[in-house]
Amino acid sequence: MSLTGKHVAILGAGHSGRAAATLALRQGARVSVWDGAGADALQGMAPGAELHPAATAEQGRSVVCDLLVVSPGIDTYGPYVAAFASQAGEVIGEVELAARYYTGSIIAITGTNGKTTTTELVARILHRAGLGGTACGNYGTPFAEVVLQDPPPAAVALELSSFQLETARTLHPAVAVWLNFAPDHLDRYPSVEAYRAAKLRIFANQTSADTAVIRAGETLPPVAAQSVTFSTLDESAAWFSDGHHIRLHGETVLDLDHDTGLRGLHNAENTMAAMAACQTLGIPFALMREALHGYAPPPHRCELIRTLDGVEYLNDSKATNLHALESALRSQTRPVVLLAGGKDKGLDYAALLPLLRQKAVACVTYGQIANPLLALFRAAVPTRAVATLAEALAAARALAPRGSTILLSPGTSSFDQFSGYEHRGNTFRDLVNQLR
């Protein structure tokens, strides 16, 4: 795809927007960058790009471009993008732009939950195999920035959110990993079906020469790629784990407890998916075990902060939807005092009640969704509603018996009170470490 002499408009001046602008300039395009923020947000942009701070939808309607590259944080369903797209030849995202100039092997990972851990595992294995294996996309480095490396890596672990898949057109993963699906982001999508349709684009350009790694039991339309299944429930799946050992067709290939720091059925699923994906590139199991030795999940994913007075404090701030909250609860073996709350994303939490009765001794809700969750959860367990995370921790400590776990697993996004799940998780960690 030649961009020489063409006008590429970049909508959004964040990390991915900057990488897209640099790549488009290198390909000979005339590049303009548009962002609703002030001039400071565009400082440090690649030389040669035309900069347009404080950009409005009215300005967007007058922009004529061959290619509009939309950053994933901007709602592609909204009027702002529609204005800029009105005179654009094609609308894509930064990942799609990068994919058009990358000639290596793509292992693409999507799912409502577990994407980042799986992407990290794939990246570690690829790196140990000498294939580069940069973690990129929704996690790590923008894909366009990876493509700009000299030379680019032979293979990448590409985490894909639904936002990035919305604007994918020609993206062609050698391996597409589908971890799971549950309703999410209903504050952005008009329906669950629209969210699901965006996710399914990961398979759109695969052929019978490619591989689709899919959790057994997922209801998917037929895919062209060769399917490989994994499960912690169905022993007939190609890959199966009891949470301690990972087996391929009945043969143990990894001891999670001995070879890694990963614990819980959800992490067993992530590990199976990563190993299955990397096996398609011919990487031997012995090398995979070396790559995964001692690996522990990143912060904010059932992260043990400390044990105080016989009570464990777990930070699962990455649980920004109901499915992630369910996974965290299911993995607990001690009585739980659950901290849940944040922004109201329009999710239905009623399905959580049986699991709360089984796993929790109490709940504390907080934030914008505190009172709706209180009204629902108190039918299952004793529940209190407070305003802030600090108040929630104090209330939970008073409710938690010795031998229990205080679990921050919010079940929704953080944007009512925090800049993101990392900010929320770091705040919780600081509050817990201040306890005496």
Image: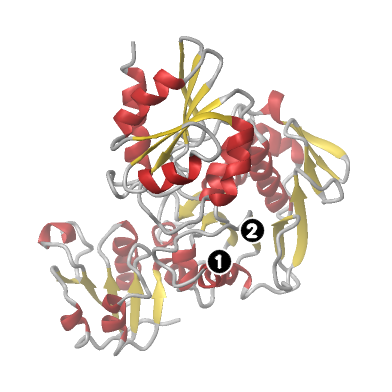
Residue 87, relative to residue 9: is it above or below?
below
For marks 2 and 1, give the CA distance: 9 Å
Q: Quadrant of residue 429?
A: top left
The residue type indicated by label 1 comes to Lys
Front in this rendered view, residue 353 or 21 = 353
**Residue at x 49%, y 38% (from the top left corner):** 378
Q: Is residue 405 above or below residue 376?
A: above
> Mark 2: which secondary structure?
strand
| Type of amino acid under label 2 | Trp
Residue 162 is situated, as x and y percent measured from the top left of the image, at: 49, 64
Residue at left 53%, top 33%? 381
User: Which sits in the foreground, 6 or 334?
Assistant: 334
Using the image, tell me which numbered label, if any, was put on residue 178.
Answer: 2
Colour option used: secondary structure
- Locate residue 292: give its quadrant: top right
Q: Which mark is residue 163?
A: none
Mark 1 packing: few (<14 Cα in 10 Å), some, or many (20+)?
Answer: many
Q: Position of residue 430 (x, y in %)?
A: 32, 25
Looking at the rendered structure, the secondary structure element under dot 1 is helix
Do residues under tags 2 and 1 come within 8 Å of each other at their CB atoms?
yes
Quadrant of the image containing the N terminus = bottom left
- Label 2, residues with CA under 10 Å away: few <14, some 14-19, many ≥20: many
In screen coordinates, is 362 left or right of 398? right
Residue 312: percent from left, percent from top? 50, 19
Q: Is residue 331 visible?
A: no
The quarter of the image holding the C terminus is: top left
Residue at mark 1: 199
Q: Give residue 433's position: percent from left, percent from top.
A: 35, 19
Res. 238 visible in picture = yes
- Above or below — where is 401 with respect to 239? above
